[in-house]
Image: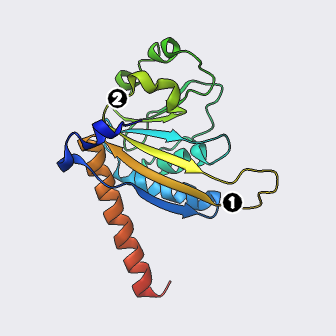
Amino acid sequence: MCSSKEATADPSASASPWSTTTGSPAETAALGERLGRLLQRGDIVLLSGELGVGKTVFTQGLGSGLETPTPVRSSSFVLLSEHPDGRLPLFHADLYRLTAAAEVAELWLDEEAADGVLVVEWPERWAADTPADHLLVRFEADLGPQAITEQRRITIAACGSTAAARLQDFTAAERSARGAAKVSGR
């Protein structure tokens, strides 16, 4: 949800998008958990992808990384779920059922979640008022009738200086973890 103009407005605040493939819901949740451990107050994470690609599973992982004691569930019938008791409050919005920008604006999402972490599924519904600083997580999967894979291609991009710093921290941690796994022979 970050235009190329916005992404390049401040080159020092940019981070290259990062991609990986997960092979199961457990791997998708674990990826979310690792990112969740790094998130800080005021961070906004937008999750984009078709139905069934793992957005809620990823959010469950984010909740684990934020040490949220209450289970994170699909919020398709609740526009905004709050999980206030973790390391930071988690606000999980699912905008799938909304059709008008005015409906999204009435939720005051960024103001509502300023004291915690905001995760938004279906951010395309919020496009006109999306905060300039956010992480965008895109999910892609083969969901055709013959699909037998649990693989998901997940790409994380940053828009804004805070999100770029968070993505740089995340990619550094991922490189370090992969290096440690190679040394230990896993």
Q: Quadrant of residue 27?
A: bottom right
The amino acid type of the residue labelled 2 equals Pro
Q: Is residue 72 left or right of residue 88?
A: right
The secondary element bearing badge 2 is classed as loop
Residue furthest front as drawn = 5
Residue placed most toward the observer, 69 or 143: 143
* Classed neighbour count for the residue bearing mark 1: other residues with Cα under 10 Å, few (<14), some (14–19), many (≥20): some
Q: Position of residue 104 (x, y in %)?
A: 49, 18
Q: Position of residue 102 (x, y in %)?
A: 49, 11
Q: Residue at x 31, y 32 (%)?
A: 132
Q: Residue at x 34, y 46 (%)?
A: 158
Ranked by sequence position, the earlier of labels 2 and 1 is 2
The secondary element bearing badge 1 is classed as loop
- Asked if residue 126 is positioned above or below residue 57 in the image, the reply reads above
The amino acid type of the residue labelled 1 equals Glu
The disc label shown at residue 19, or none: none
Is residue 81 visible in the rendered structure shown here?
A: no
- Mark 1 lies on residue: 150
Q: Position of residue 115 (x, y in %)?
A: 32, 30
Q: Position of residue 167 (x, y in %)?
A: 33, 53
Where does the N terminus fall, quadrant-wise? top left
Q: Residue at x 31, y 35 (%)?
A: 42
The disc label shown at residue 131, or none: 2
- Asked if residue 43 is positioned above or below residue 154 in the image, the reply reads above
* Classed neighbour count for the residue bearing mark 2: other residues with Cα under 10 Å, few (<14), some (14–19), many (≥20): some
